[in-house]
Image (tube, rainbow, N blue to C red):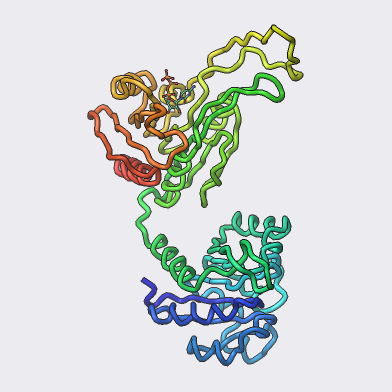
Amino acid sequence: MLAGKRILIVIGGGIAAYKVLEVIRRLKERGAEVRVILTRSGKEFVTPMTVGALSGEKVFSDLFDPTEEQDIGHIVLSRDTDLILVAPATANLIARMANGIADELATASLLAAAAPIIVCPAMNQRMWAHPATQRNAAQLAADGVRFIGPAEGRMAERNEAGVGRLSEPMDIVAGVEAFFAEATQPKPLAGRHVLVTSGPTIEPIDPVRFITNRSSGKQGHAIAAAAARAGARVTLISGPVSVPNPRGVDVVHVETAREMLDAVFAALPADAAVMAAAVSDWRPAEVAGEKIKKAAGAPPPLSFLENPDILATLGHDNRRPKLVVGFAAETTDVESNAARKLVSKGADYIIANDVSAASGVFGGDSNSVYVLSSAGVEAWPTLAKEEVADRLIGLIAKRLG
Ligand code: CTP
């Protein structure tokens, strides 16, 4: 998998730099061509001589070295490569990258890079946890940079431990292999726009109280991630969840069913829509402007209004995506209830699952579903939610042709 891959490694100035020598060896063993840029402070930890001997290539370091610029130049260095690996990425190097600072050959090359970048952070746990570093790392992630680690464990400083260690060399190599495996995966949804709803909605009662449901967003988010891996442009419209935003997906955060409906229609046109959100069917008829006070012996009466049915609205709209997939959360008569929803909601597929407490689906990591369409019913075995997502995306890709 790594044979012939051109990997540029930027070695930053951290005590863990010596571990990257092992990474170079392992990548070379697997057939990769490795070139290295040392940052100025990286040279304090490993020598160009050692790195050059291991990589079998000239090691670069100085931006204003005229012979180096003539040999190759920092622009070529960062362009003529399939992947850039930054390891160890110190807090300082991450901060410079996040802010587009090009103050030496390493950072200038990163700024000129056309190739994908993987960053392997390594620093004291307090530096990693600092809001400034977290902000910089989040900025890099938003810019499309990937991360391997940091790992948890003992620090170079005595008696210190936590999250911030450089990942183990073989974990970094595995991450690089996974990157190339993903990059060579077929992209059956390239050029398609897929809309996914996920998570619960929350419907306010007053400024501090609301009603909601137990949806975790795991299944919907897994579907969005799978669609992105399949090459689609993905808009994920999510209620409040604690699962992280999937990589490579545009996420729109909403709270109420009506906000979700608006966001769905604002995101059209789409080729396919998967409505995995657990939309609240009702909302309190009145939302108190102030917190409702407790009056002894007189709990407030709550009355409800019906929320719009987002799936049915979309399923019957003339701007409807070519393929509309709904979910059916049932606790009884799963198949027959789902079959009814297929028709009433104007969906092409209904993915029906049993959400009774005994099934453990809500909040759990696996799902057993029935897939209903006009062609009939298919029962899938119990699968991890990621696998359900991959299968569903496979089905959608096939139907879109
Ligand atoms: N759905 C929706 N808008 C609603 C309610 C549900 O878009 N107001 C969608 C869900 O995202 C899901 C499908 O409809 O894709 C089925 O949801 P489910 O809760 O199973 O069905 P309901 O229509 O709410 O019916 P019931 O609660 O009676 O089972």
Residue positioned 55% across, 87% down in the render: 51
From the viewer's perspective, is 71 left or right of 105?
A: left
Q: Position of residue 145 (x, y in %)?
A: 57, 61
Residue 268 is at least partly visible in this image = no
Which quadrant holds the N terminus?
bottom left
What is the total number of numbered labels drawn onto the structure image? 0
Residue positioned 62% across, 11% down in the render: 302
The residue closer to the viewer here, 401 or 60, is 60
| Figure quarter occupied by ligand 1 | top left
Residue 192 is at least partly visible in this image = yes
Q: Position of residue 225 (x, y in %)?
A: 46, 47
The residue closer to the viewer here, 54 or 186, is 54
Q: Position of residue 245 (x, y in %)?
A: 55, 46
Residue positioned 64% across, 8% down in the render: 301
From the viewer's perspective, is 177 left or right of 15?
A: left
Which quadrant holds the C terminus?
top left
Q: Position of residue 228 (x, y in %)?
A: 45, 49
Residue positioned 54% across, 71% down in the render: 85
Q: Measured along the vertical axis of the image, is residue 84 above or below residue 183? A: below
Q: Measured along the vertical axis of the image, is residue 253 above or below residue 157? A: above
Q: Residue furthest front?
A: 159
The residue closer to the viewer here, 135 or 397, is 135
Q: Measured along the vertical axis of the image, is residue 226 above or below residue 343? A: below
From the viewer's perspective, is 272 left or right of 264?
A: left
